[in-house]
Image (tube, grey):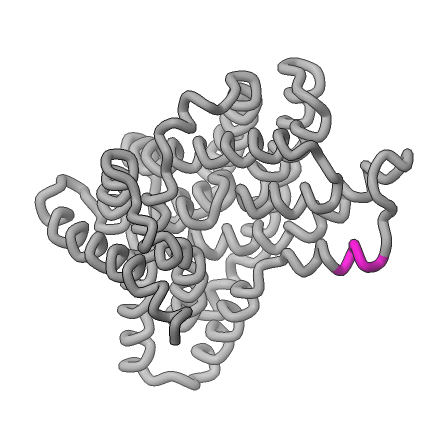
Amino acid sequence: MSGIRRLVPGLALLVVCGLIARWLAEFVPLGSPLVVVIGVSALIANAVGIPESAEPGVDTHGRWLEAGIVLMGASVGLERLIEAGGPVLLVVVTAVCVSIVSVEVLARFLLPVPEKLGSLLAAGSSICGVSAVAAVAASIDPDRRQVAYAAGTILLFDAVTLVVYPIVGRTLGLSDLVFGVWAGATMFSTGPVTAAGFAYSQPAGEWAVIVKLARNALIGAVAVGYATYYSRDGGSEAFTGMRLLRIWRTVPAFIVGFLALVVLATLGAFSSAQIAAMDRVSSWLFLVAFAGLGFRIDVREFFDVGMRPAAVVLAGLFVVSTSVLLVLRAVF
């Protein structure tokens, strides 16, 4: 019980921020509570800071995001996944490959940074943000400062793309499908992708999450690929079976939960009332999760992140986002 009591102040803070955001969203043109709550919590974090007693509860925000995605699976029909399977998989694989290659080329030849830092930036921008940075770092043993630089750069672009993508989407008049697939295929981390998608529309949010989960599922393959590359000359720890197991354990478990609810809902395991209830709970979980996401936005990162890593990621993001958007607009 003492462990649970430690979480109460932070959880209460997240809920209060969510309630404030739902109220403020009524007065913000085109405002979504999911985006407003990030702004509210980020303002609090950077203006007055987070009370130490609230830190443990705030740190649970990632779990609430995962739980919300799992419950969202009940309202996503299996037929949609099957229908989208081929095209979405093609878009995801293409986006991941283009992102990795472009960032690696930029980092090695055009805007040179240390080799392993470039690989961390490529993994973070192509798969699932800081989670991919951590997974690949576990497989290639970079300098700790390189991990910090890569993580800081990715978090910087998470904050920027969360705001910029919906603006670009509305300016270009993108359909819900195109915007959702575009955001899911090219933005970095699951939280900002989900927030941007649902800020655009409910269907766009669902498509963004589906595509993003497909990308997340590739984290193990990319980590293994980098481990194999860096162990070719004995420059890093031997590529053992235990290491392979440790890398594959980084594959997000909530993807399995999401797919399980998709299948159960398709088989009729839930009534329409139960699905509606899970959808409402999912919306609240997202709201609480994004409050925590906002609390982790530090404006000092805009000044602390080195210019060259940021330039590498910016150029890579421009290449992959533009190319994917052009393809999507041509196809859809």
Question: Image height check: is 152 above or below 223?
Answer: above
Q: Residue 285 vs residue 115: left or right?
A: left
Residue 95 in view: no
Residue 311 in view: yes
Q: Nearer the viewer, residue 57 or 39?
A: 57
Quadrant of image for the N terminus: bottom left
Spot occupied by residue 326 in the image (x, y as percentages of width and height): 48, 32
Spot occupied by residue 221 in the image (x, y as percentages of width and height): 71, 50
Numbered range of the magenta stretch: 241-245
Q: Residue 270 vs residue 214: left or right?
A: left
Within the image, what quadrant is residue 111 found in?
A: top right
Spot occupied by residue 66 in the image (x, y as percentages of width and height): 45, 61
Question: Image height check: is 223 above or below 271?
Answer: above
Rendered residue at 32%/54% (across/down): 54
Rendered residue at 18%/50% (across/down): 21
Question: Image height check: is 76 above or below 96?
Answer: below
Q: Is residue 244 magenta-colored? A: yes
Q: Residue 85 vs residue 139: left or right?
A: left
Spot occupied by residue 323 in the image (x, y as percentages of width and height): 53, 30
